[in-house]
Amino acid sequence: MTTIESSPEAVAATTDDSDAPSDASDTWLDRISDTLSSTDHKVIGRLYLGGGLLGLLTAVVLSVLISLERIDGADALLDEGALPQLFDGQRIALVFGALLPLAVAACIYAVPMQLGARSIAFPRLAAAGFWMWFGGLVLNAIALINNGGTLGSDSDMVGLFIVSMGLMAIGLTATAGAIATSILTTRAPGMTMRRIPPFSWSALVFALGVILVMPVFVGTLTYVFLDHRNGRTGFGGNEGIFDWVGWMVTQPATFLFAIPAIGLFAEAMPITFNRRLPARGVMFAGLALIGVAAFAAVTQQNLQGLPWAGSDLSTDDLGEKAQDLVPYFLFNVLPVIGIVLVALIALLCARPDGEIKVNITPAFVFGFLGFGMVLVGMVGNLLYAIDDLGLQGTVFEEATLVYIVYGAAIGGMGATIHWGPKLWGPAAPTTKAAPLAMLAVVGTVLAAFPLYIAGFLDQPAGAVYDDGDLSVWNILSTIGHGVMALTVIAFVGLLASTNRSSDDDQPVDDPWDGQTLEWTTTSPAPRDNFVDVPVVHSAEPLLDLKQAGSSATTDGSTA
């Protein structure tokens, strides 16, 4: 499969540019305009990244407010009528404002370079997808601020709330289509599907999953919107919105959206231990198993529809047990098996046989810690789906969501630092990046694990609970969200300071001793990524070149 050239900027670059304006006339307004209208996948990825970090910070702030309200329900900080919008905003911001855009950002800016492509397929579609997503997010915020949402009393704002979710879904589907098409059609010569990097494979599973679930989501929103604008009897009006579409902002649908963060962990392990990835087929199968969560979303079954019913294991109940256990295994257990397979294959890179050259990079630190948080959330989801434990309707589900979203966000930060040199040149030092990853994990554990405990203590979800015995867990959760807010702010500061590095520090093309194609081009990467389209002969083309050069030097055949 050869590279498709579909970038308008690339086509323009090959034409006569004698009439192009000089750099002297290039004002800051022109640069902003060029950025906002660009179809360069690296620019689109940065736009998604900026929007995702803003959405993450918003979600964290909303979570802090909710946690503060829960500490002492008898002394509310906010008006009681605003609480429904606060809960709706938190969930939308976590999934549509942070989890999805951060995953899409990493796929957009990294995958074409990993494939050896000059651009992303359908770049205008990818750019239009960003603006639809961003516009939908802004409209969603406006609707919630003006008394929309699931319990809002303003009919027009409730309608806007529904429409804005559909607009975000359509935009994300458009961008996911560009990502999937790129992986399937724009690979460098010689790069078969078995040779694509693990992160690109995770991006393909993620993109195909988004393409599969979002049309179902939009279709359901259409029914809900029509019901809201008419009789409000078929779907319960605005109070029934999340009864029908809530599966998109809970588990196991969020497993699908966290797959790129898991792919970063799989990508970082071979680089960390300077080895080729073993059993690539098994690794790819593990990532695909996590994508099975998409089918749970397509069937519109959330975990409340997939519990183990909890009746006695008598002969009369065996048929009911089988009916419960089959979907429970397919949609909850299989994704966990998939992530465990990914972990086992990745850890084979650290096997002690032979000489090991350990290279700790930010991608490894962020990827490993983010992977761990997502795994804890997925395991917690297994418990939540067992009806005997009585966790449905408690804050336990919110804890699993926080684990997955914050864990995936840690992975997204790691991806930004890992591929940052290809976006803006300088590389962030590991000594500065690693403490941020550890701080993010502390914040995630403090924010989510106390809610696990509160869930077992029957603290209800989506409500301010006036119970002094549970105050300590809500206080710890508040501190955790606060730590995560500081982490996001510090991360943005790290990116800003890295970009302002001294001119004496020349960017390094391969700062992490990588193995794949993106590290063969310059830092930052040019508009078309590569001067010449590379030809691939293995899954680790850059590692082949390094080993060939090392052998030639050892033999004395070259200097």
Image: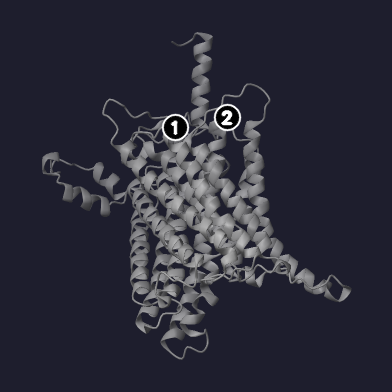
**Tag in front: 1 or 2:** 1
Q: Mark 1 points at which residue?
A: 431
Q: Earlier in the sequence, mark 1 or mark 2?
A: 2
Q: What residue type is labelled 1?
A: Thr
In the rendered view, tell whether residue 57 sits above or below residue 356: below
The structure residue drawn at horizontal position 36% and vertical position 40%, both measured from the top left corner, is: 494
- State the SS at label 1: helix
Disc 1 to disc 2, C-alpha distance: 19 Å
The structure residue drawn at horizontal position 70% and vertical position 64%, both measured from the top left corner, is: 328
- Residue 196 image point, x, y percent: 53, 41
- Residue 236 image point, x, y percent: 51, 85
Q: In this view, does 401 lie to the left or right of 133?
A: right
Residues packed near mark 1 inside 10 Å, few (<14), some (14 to 19) or many (20 plus): few
Q: In this view, does 455 lie to the left or right of 67?
A: right
Q: In this view, does 270 lie to the left or right of 181?
A: right
Location of residue 37 (image quadrant) = bottom left
Q: Mark 2 points at which residue?
A: 273
